Image (cartoon, rainbow, N blue to C red):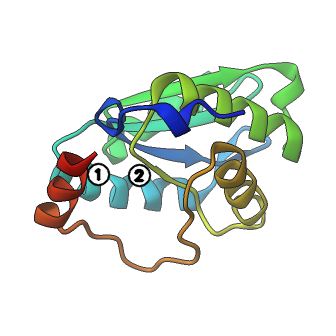
Amino acid sequence: MSTFNNTDLAAFKGVWVFCEQRQGTMMPTSFELISEGRKLADSLGVELCGLLLGDNVEGIAKELGGYGADKVILCESPLLKNYTTDAYTKVICDVVEQYKPEVMLIGATNIGRDLGPRCAARLHTGLCADCTHLDVDMAVYKDFLSEK
């Protein structure tokens, strides 16, 4: 069960991007989302973090900095070499519950369309699917946070 239900919203900081790789190669959507995530993080005044899962993928993690990531969280295990719904969902949800990003971007790839709804359901949070533009109305967002 998620601990989000009783958590102060002010504890959530940062924009994260799930960086999808396949067989040790970063998928182009990861770079696109890092670039868009950078804009969103800048407007919120927070860090942009890439989240990369796999096995022996540390070398490709460095590519993300060139696209605007402030840092990368790397989760490596032989069990994460190939995508499986249950393993990736568990690892992502555990890391999200630990570090508490306020926004998580996942590409609308086959994997992303499987992973996003499962993580949202497990974390008891909302999901916006198939977005082509992201923006934050800062005045409304700050009012929302101050009400909590």
In the rendered structure, the answer to whether residue 128 lies left or right of residue 49 reads right
Q: Nearer the viewer, residue 1 or 50?
A: 1
- Marks 2 & 1, CB-CB < 8 Å contact: yes
79 above or below 50?
A: above
Q: Nearer the viewer, residue 55 or 85?
A: 85
User: What residue sits 71% from the left and 21% below the top?
Assistant: 76
In the rendered structure, the answer to whether residue 31 lies left or right of residue 129 reads left
| Count of marks overlaid on the render | 2
Residue pointed to by mark 2: 34
Please tell me whether mark 2 sits on a helix, a strand or a loop. Answer: helix
Residue 114 numbered mark, or none = none
Please tell me whether mark 1 sits on a helix, a strand or a loop. Answer: helix
User: What residue sits 69% from the left and 48% below the top?
Assistant: 119
Q: Is residue 82 visible?
A: no
Q: Position of residue 130 (x, y in %)?
A: 57, 78
Identify which amino acid the numbered label 2 is placed on: Ile
Q: Position of residue 20 (x, y in %)?
A: 65, 48
Mark-to-mark CA distance, 2 and 1: 6 Å
3 above or below 124?
A: above
Disc 1 crowd rating (10 Å Cα; few below 14, some 14-19, many 20+) is many
Q: Position of residue 94 (x, y in %)?
A: 66, 27
Q: Position of residue 75 (x, y in %)?
A: 66, 23
Residue pointed to by mark 1: 38
Q: Is residue 142 visible?
A: yes
Write down the quadrant of residue 74 in the picture: top right
